[in-house]
Amino acid sequence: MRSGEMAKMTQLIDNEVFQAYATYTTIILLKMMLMSLITAYFRITRKAFANPEDTASFGKGESAKKYLRTDPDVERVRRGHLNDLENIVPFLGIGLLYALSGPELSTALLHFRIFTGARIVHTFAYLIPLPQPGRGLSWAVGYAVTISMAYKVLKTSLYL
Amino acid sequence: MRSGEMAKMTQLIDNEVFQAYATYTTIILLKMMLMSLITAYFRITRKAFANPEDTASFGKGESAKKYLRTDPDVERVRRGHLNDLENIVPFLGIGLLYALSGPELSTALLHFRIFTGARIVHTFAYLIPLPQPGRGLSWAVGYAVTISMAYKVLKTSLYL
Amino acid sequence: MRSGEMAKMTQLIDNEVFQAYATYTTIILLKMMLMSLITAYFRITRKAFANPEDTASFGKGESAKKYLRTDPDVERVRRGHLNDLENIVPFLGIGLLYALSGPELSTALLHFRIFTGARIVHTFAYLIPLPQPGRGLSWAVGYAVTISMAYKVLKTSLYL
């Protein structure tokens, strides 16, 4: 019984696939974290803050209050960051389950690499910005890769 | 030693529970991803965009600029999407740890099914919209299920 | 072959480290979930709502419509909540991979405890609010801990 379950475990978890998942997930999460630094950079250079306590170094009263404002560059980075959250969270969850569903290493690498590449292109497309459909296409590629992994997960381990 | 740890592993990971977690997590993440498509649908039909490059197909200058605006329907979907992120991310993490904490299959299925159902109802309640407390209740049910799983995780594997 | 893979599994997953990850991840996700309740508290006490159906209990027409507004306290909690998402999602993913990368228990505990402490301080710094650089520093500490774990993950299991 116990060894039967263990055999299932060793079928489930293929180390190289899991290492590939670990590598690409870490890279794409670090990329997402970079958005915080880019937001901070634009907030400081554009002097556009959201919290009164963040403008205290500019003096008191009206002289500081004018920096409590939105700035198009800051808002653009923030939209890119939120789009990352909306797309990388599904990758995090579905990708983990996919890595545990016993895919071929080459197929898994293809999924992880295309997703990671697409999201990096998406960030450049958002920040430069590239003309559409540049950003739209890079978003769609990442989205399609996640759907493909979800299909494999449900095909392998559907249990309703 | 090593076989002792392996025994723990086989106690930790019950395949059917993990497959159920994989199934419901994939379903609810796909549902969350659907919010992106619904946002895009409303942005296009309401002609309400956030980025200048998204309105380029409507011409140049003022004729395109008027489509850089917020729309109540778009904002409603976006709030629903953000609420998904705020609630599905805890489910993703706590649910995984719960699935590994050795719950009864029937108990685990109950948690996963109620959470998934509650979040689907929440989406309909937000988008139709249903009168309150419809949305509030569906939110609270998903929230309570996650708290219940968190309690089981901490009871099983508290290590401070 | 199979037993070789199993040996790798037992090296990968150290139970005490994983239990520590489970504990601190659950705590910090519960803390993040608390932001929803705090938002609801401020929405109700400040009478500032985002959805028309949420103001229906205040009557119809203009008398209810005036509560469809933003409030500085509500917006502050929401910014804190979004900052949680932006930082706790990377911890969730990178922390899991880190816990599976075979760190020393004491090192892992140090990472998990500092991250969790930093994010709790960050919440207080945001909500009180504390003067800067209080919030900035607590944010940076959590960020640095996540980078440190990412470094360990990539050093252990880089597979490009």
Image: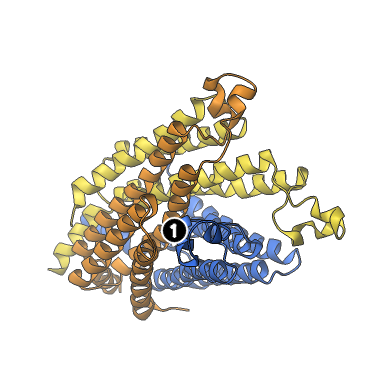
Chain colours: A orange, B blue, C yellow
Tell me: A139 left or right of A20: right
Where residue B16 appears, as percent x and y from the top left, is 40, 74
Q: Amino acid at mark 1?
A: Glu
Tell me: B53 left or right of C67: left
- Residue at screen point 25% across, 73% down: A103
Q: How many marks?
A: 1
Q: Which residue is mark 1?
A: B53
Residue extending furthest top?
Answer: A59
Vertical comparison of C15 with A102: above or below: above
**Label 1, residues with CA under 10 Å away: few <14, some 14-19, many ≥20:** some
- For the residue labelled by badge 1, is the local secondary structure a helix, a strand or a loop? helix
Vertical comparison of B19 with C115: above or below: below
Tell me: B65 left or right of C7: right
Where residue A33 appears, as percent x and y from the top left, is 37, 45
- Residue at screen point 45% across, 44% down: A73
Visible residue check, residue A55? yes
Q: Pick whichever, B73 or A97, lies toward us.
A: B73
Vertical comparison of C67 with A137: above or below: above
Question: Could you say which quadrant of the image residue A120 lies in?
Answer: bottom left
Q: Pick whichever, B33 or B109, lies toward us.
A: B33
Vertical comparison of A57 with C74: above or below: above
